[in-house]
């Protein structure tokens, strides 16, 4: 069993490739700010901040390309935490929030869902698994402006303040480990909570050249 609640947004990548129907209209958005903390099994929270270095946890985001330029795309968020021999990595994808106003929004990740890799100590294997089609709630605390056609991507007054809380309970979940070039089975033993806040403004968006494409 696991419970997932997410509220976050991010990078946009609108594209179609030259052999696909429709124009190629890519764009990106980066966070004005992104910070939060991770608490694992009741341990002291470990902070992270997109603008800081030297913290136990680091966070980044990257565009998830979509071959259909007319479909809202997702942003991939990568979170990595290390404390002693304990290591956690989580990768998940968040929906496009240009079309969402203030409030709570019930959404679902795509088939790639959420990837988690966790090692509690040096004596344990680092187990990883995927959680596809994960339901989550995205909370927009403050919203102004919205979607605009390429190349603007958003209106001049666009602003979003976002919150995310992701709680997972995966004790004993069947998973995989990769050791010496061999993939074998293991049991993932993880429970924790990740809390984040983020901001996105009009100046954070950048349209690429109209003939560029993203391949995945």
Image (cartoon, helix red, strand yellow):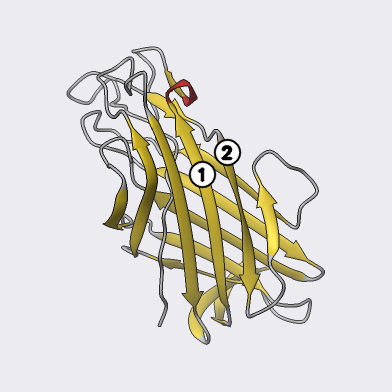
Furthest toward the left, the residue is 21
Helix, strand or loop at mark 1: strand
Dot 2 corresponds to which residue?
33
- Rendering coords of residue 91 (x, y %): 51, 55
Dot 1 corresponds to which residue?
198
Helix, strand or loop at mark 2: strand
How many other residues sit within 10 Å of disc 2, few (<14), some (14-19) or many (≥20)? some
Residue 43 left/right relative to 205: right
Res 17 quadrant in image? top left
Closer to the camera, 83 or 211? 83
Q: Vertical placement of 17 versus 152: above or below?
A: below
Report the Cα–Cα distance between label 2 and label 1.
5 Å
Residue plotted at (55% across, 63% down) = 194
How many marks the image carries: the answer is 2
Q: Is residue 181 visible?
A: no
Between disc 2 and disc 1, whose residue precedes? 2
Furthest toward the bottom, the residue is 172
- Rendering coords of residue 134 (x, y %): 34, 64
């Amino acid at each position: 069993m696991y419970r997932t609640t997410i509220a976050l947004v991010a990078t946009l990548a609108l594209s179609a490739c030259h052999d696909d129907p429709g124009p190629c209209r890519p764009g990106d958005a980066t966070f004005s700010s992104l910070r939060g903390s991770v608490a694992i099994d009741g341990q002291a929270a470990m902070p992270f901040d997109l603008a800081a270095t030297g913290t136990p946890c680091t966070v980044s985001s990257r565009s998830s390309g979509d071959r259909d330029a007319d479909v809202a795309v997702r942003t991939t968020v990568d979170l990595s935490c290390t404390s002693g021999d304990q290591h956690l990595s989580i990768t998940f994808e968040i929906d496009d929030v240009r079309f969402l106003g203030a409030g709570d929004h019930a959404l679902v990740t795509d088939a790639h869902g959420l990837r988690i890799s966790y090692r509690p100590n040096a004596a344990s294997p680092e187990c990883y698994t995927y959680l596809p089609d994960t339901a989550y709630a995205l909370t927009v605390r403050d919203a102004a402006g919205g979607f605009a056609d390429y190349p603007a991507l958003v209106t001049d007054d666009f602003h979003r303040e976002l919150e995310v809380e992701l709680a997972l309970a995966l004790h004993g979940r069947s998973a995989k480990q990769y050791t010496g070039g061999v993939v074998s089975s293991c049991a993932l033993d993880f429970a924790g909570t990740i809390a984040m806040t983020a901001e996105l403004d009009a100046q954070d968006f950048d349209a690429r050249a109209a003939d560029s494409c993203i391949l995945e």
